[in-house]
Image (cartoon, rainbow, N blue to C red):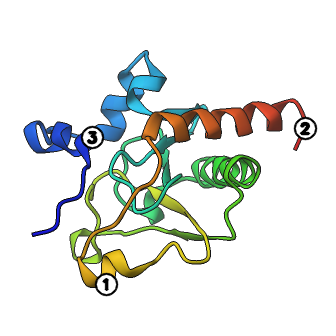
């Protein structure tokens, strides 16, 4: 049996949590601890702690709402605004060659959190899908989450300073 070292997953295994981790994250005063990279009045950007790829983030409305059609116009604009900002920050800091952007609405669609709608932004690079997922059904995340967090924050800071 092949083994993959992924010590960050033990936190989820031991304590998968209850309730909405989006709302719990918003209540935190330590954005680094909960991986919130940006807060707005109507939406926020948070890293996926169990990412599909390096730099995988989610943008969600602040309001706890489960479906896209229940978002008001201000929330839709706010989500889109933060999505655009984080893509620019990722372009600067990680230089992906493309993105998967989407939402899973409802449990049958694959949504892990069904009652707080959120949009995924997953950076992609040529060759990031290698033999590991095909042969061993294992995905390799090659950078520590906090290192990626710092890169995204740097990109957002540069964006705010009009350097990118």
Disc 2 + disc 1, Cβ < 8 Å:
no
15 and 135: which is toward the camera: 135
Q: Nearer the viewer, residue 70 or 141?
A: 141
- Secondary element at image label 3: helix
Q: Position of residue 110 (x, y in %)?
A: 27, 71
Name which residue lies at 36% across and 43% down: 64
Q: How crowded is the residue under tag 1: few (<14 C-alpha within 10 Å), some, or many (20+)?
A: few
Where's the C terminus, which quadrant?
Answer: top right
Tag in front: 2 or 3: 3
Residue 144, percent from left and from top = 44, 41
Residue at label 2? 163
**In-front residue for pair 46/154:** 154
Q: Quadrant of the N terminus?
A: bottom left
Q: Earlier in the sequence, mark 2 or mark 1?
A: 1
Measured in 3D between alpha carbons, the distance from the residue under mark 3 to the one under mark 1, in whole angstroms, is 23 Å
Above or below 164: residue 37: above
Which of label 2 and label 1 is nearer to you? 1
Residue tagged by mark 1? 134
Which of the 4 image quadrants contains residue 160? top right
Sequence-wise first label, 3 or 1: 3
Ranked by sequence position, the earlier of labels 2 and 3 is 3
What is the quadrant of residue 157 in the picture? Answer: top right
């Amino acid at each position: 049996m092949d083994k993959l070292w992924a010590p960050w997953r033990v936190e989820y295994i031991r304590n998968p949590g209850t309730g909405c981790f989006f709302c719990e994250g918003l209540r935190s005063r330590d954005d680094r601890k909960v991986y919130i990279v940006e807060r707005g009045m109507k939406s926020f950007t948070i890293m996926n702690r169990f990412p599909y790829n390096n730099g995988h983030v989610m943008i969600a409305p602040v309001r706890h709402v489960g479906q896209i059609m229940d978002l008001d116009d201000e929330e839709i604009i706010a989500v889109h605004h933060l999505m655009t900002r984080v893509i620019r920050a990722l372009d600067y800091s990680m230089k992906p060659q493309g993105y998967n952007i989407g939402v899973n609405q409802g449990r049958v669609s694959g949504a892990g959190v069904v009652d707080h709608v959120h949009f995924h932004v997953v950076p992609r690079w040529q060759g990031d899908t290698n033999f590991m997922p095909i042969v061993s059904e294992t995905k390799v995340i090659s950078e520590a989450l906090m290192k990626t967090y710092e890169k995204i924050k740097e990109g957002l800071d540069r964006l705010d300073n009009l350097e990118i």
